Image (tube, coloured by chain):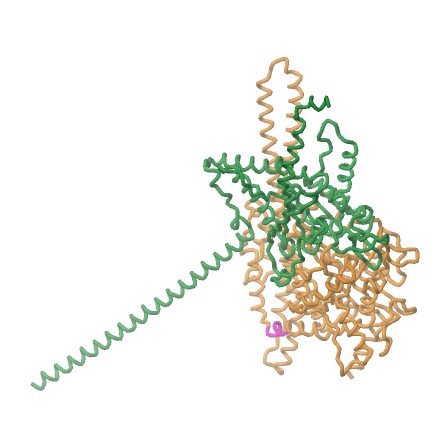
Amino acid sequence: MTSDRALVGISNLPNQRYKIVSSNGGTFTLMVCGESGLGKTTFINTLFQTTLKHVDSQRRNQPIKKTVEIDVLRAVLEEKNFSLRVNVVDTPGFGDNVNNNKSWQTIIDFIDDQHDSYMRQEQQPFRTVKFDLRVHAVLYFIRPTGHGLKPLDIETMKRISSRANLIPVIAKSDTLTAQELQDFKIRIRQVIEAQEIRIFTPPLDDSSSPDPALMEHARQLIESMPFAIIGSEEKYDNGQGQMIAARKYPWGLVEVENDSHCDFRKLRSLLLRTNLLDLILSTQKLHYEAYRKLRLEGAGSTEDPSLPTRAPARKLSHNPQFKEEENALKKYFTDQVKAEEQRFRQWEQNIVNERIRLNSDLEEVQAKVKKLEEQVRTLQLRRH
Amino acid sequence: MSSANVLFRRKKDYKRGVAYSVLLVGNSGTGKTTFANNLLESAVFPHRYGMEASEVPNNPRVKVVKPTMVVSYNSKNGIPSYMSQFDASREHLEPGVTITSTTMEISTGAEEPPSRSSVSSDSSSFLQNPDKILFNLVNTHGVGENLDNSMCFDEITGYLEQQFDQVLAEETRIKRNPRFEDTRVHVALYFIEPTGHGLREMDVEMMKRLSRYTNVLPIISRADSFTRAELSKFKKQIMNDVEKYNVPVYKFDVDPEEDDLETIEENQGLALLQPFAVVSSDEKNSNGEYIRSYPWGDLKVDDENVSDLRVLKNVLFGSHFQEFKDTTQNFLYENYRAEKLSTVADWDVDSGKDLSTNKRDSAAPSLSNFASLITTGQFKSSQSLAIPPQSDTPSTPEMNEHSKEVDSPLRQMSQSIRLGNEEIINKIKNSPRINSSGSPDRTKLRNISETVPYVLKHERIIAKQQKLEELEAQSARELQKRIQELEKKAGELKLREKLLRQQHANGSAPSLQSRNSTQSVVSQQSKIKKEESTTDLASIVNGRS
């Protein structure tokens, strides 16, 4: 009773805050990136335990030479009255062609564009409504070759890692035995280190009083990077009467949520349970700030005061692939024009020649006429 | 008579061993090497990353005759990437493509291996099961690993064409080499990545190109990434795509009039199974069977419920062994030969020469303008490089002057090739040609038999030379880049030295004495460093001028 009176109510602030936050909900944008056929769609569905995204049957009917596209999927997930707006960005067509040079450009452009649009919304006079699609985490799917990273993987990861939180994962890891997987992970980690690719790691010590259990958890997460994952939308009986997500092979049942089979639980923990806030904050503080700084500084050096109106000259013309195509088209066009001009000139020449010929004919005829007239005159003179 | 002759030749072949060549193509990491080891049931091929060289007792029936060697390659830095050491800091460089070839002797005489017991040995058994197979396994490395994989196609088809050319040249020669080895590839196994979606641009393009020179069998590798339902769906999807894009893969066709019932049944079964799904592994269990052991269970590579490896083995070495050889010889090679000879038959020496010089003009530079290439960083396709049209003397003095100073083995090679080239052309030119005497057909035939080997050789040499020149250009560019880097570094060092000197001059107060001394040491060091880089530069500059 006495303590009740002593409290003013200041300590209720966190609770008020909690109410606001839980009524507002949160936003989380996740990008999945990797070659086709690595189970990106399945993984998304496994992660959120619903069929967010259907396997795209339309893609079959497209021409075999593809361009990288951006595919955004929005969903609202609810758990215990808290709603999370989830945006999943897919990149179909990445790495599918014979020539994959610059195919990362579309992805990089998308990430930059989101930063840019957020920045410009911030600069508006009324900035309450924000359309925020900044990518909080990029899952990069690595093919389980058992060899190492391909140059395409390295180049793409390098570029992504300077713009967003990159989390590399080994897809379809149920095709690698334990020993192979370990060797593969070690090799990938070596490459990541040597190539100076910055991957997202859960912060180890962010407060003055580190929680030993949390620390241990974070360390475990870091140790098992890159995460080896499998995904499945099917559920099977695990022998104890429980239905669990798993893949059923003739030689055994691979359980998705079994730590000895794959790192799916660890990845989910990193993405949602323990480090979702870290992902969002580091996007805001690190990557967005870096982008902002770069843009503002870049604008300062070019002495362009009208920054907000200055759109980045990216879009379509920026993509080197399109540029090449454009150049080819231009060349084709000029060639065509040249050929046509040549043809016209030829035509004109022909006409001129024809005219000269006709003129000379005419002159000849006139000369003949004159001659005849002359003859007629002489004859007339003779007759007279 | 001719069939008896063929039989006789075959008999003779079987004494020496029947040549049989298989090409493995597919993206790296799809398990080609492991598959090859499983196929031969011995650890013949080492792995790219040397995952614990398992001491498997080698199959006594397999004997390596010619160890693995690089037969063709293409890469940016001019060095075949095959078996290069794993270096994490260089992994971002494109590995290019490398083709290796290994020849083995497989004796199959005495006891039948268990995997072949199901072969239907209806017709004369020795035809189906020769005593010895000279097995040539051609493997490709680095396909699909580059950013731009378009050069892989040309490299591989180039290799296949070369094998055809060699046989063609041998056939038309007057005096034949009795020890000639036929290295035409009879079957190409194309490893499809287990995506679960369908064929990709790369797959379609590669299989289409390969099928001009060899029988193509599409194979789903790493089939253990699919559940049973997924696998059958994927197989269906692939066959759909094969139809859709008109990929001419080998089909197990049946001819109801000629084939007997057993063959028809077998082929129909195989056609349903296509594309074969294989699982391969390096691990062996205590029984000596290859297995893959996962935390959730083990699977046997030979298990027919899981993988078609056993069936595939059977097809390759048993039931369709002769079939593959025959289609290669009678259909693919004949087509190629007809095409080639019809272009070569009315091949005029002079026009051909013009053609070659034209080719040369457009080709990239050679070492003789290496210096200019380094300084400008651009190609200078100078006319002097091509063979001067009227020169019958084997070497032009001008060219020699140009290249005297630079002494690299590469240049010598290209030089010798060039000389060889001209010699051949001269030979062809000076070869006695009988015109109008005798029947025209005869002269033509004679012409063909005389010129074809040379022409083919000539073409090959030109191609080789072009490749060498390209390699040269590439390495020159690389070198130039390095020079620029060094120059930049030298400039930086110079700047720093200058700065330090200034500081040194300014800060002559006694209190800074100690710091100065360290500074001077630093400047000394930087000076030394700088000198190193300049000497490096100087040597390069000396070398190139």
Region of the chain picked out in magenta, as a range: B341-346
Determine the image quadrant of residue A208.
top right
What is the x, y in percent for residue B116? 87, 69
- Corner quadrant of residue B428: bottom right
Q: In x, y percent, where is residue A41?
A: 68, 53
Is residue B545 visible in the rendered image? The answer is no
**Residue drawn 45% across the image and 37% down it:** A306
Q: In the picture shown, does residue B212 fall above or below A365? A: above
B340, A173: nearer the viewer: A173
Residue sitting at the far left: A384
Where the C terminus of chain B falls, by quadrant? top right
Q: Which residue is drawn at 54% across and 46% down?
A: B376
The answer to which of A91 and A94 lies nearer the viewer is: A91
Side of A350 where A33 appears, left or right: right
Note whether B450 is above or below A243 in the view shown.
below
Q: Which residue lies furthest to the front in this view?
A: A1
Residue B345 included in the magenta stretch of the image: yes
The residue sitting at 58% across, 33% down in the picture is B491
Q: Where is residue A183 in the image (x, y as percent from the top left)?
A: 79, 46
The answer to whether residue A126 shows anywhere in this view is yes
* Residue B477, magenta (yes or no): no
Residue A132: image quadrant is top right
Q: How many marks do you count on the picture?
A: 0
Residue farthest to the top? B510
Figure chain in orange? B
Q: Chain A is drawn in which colour?
A: green
State the image coordinates of residue A78 (x, y, percent, origin top left): 67, 46
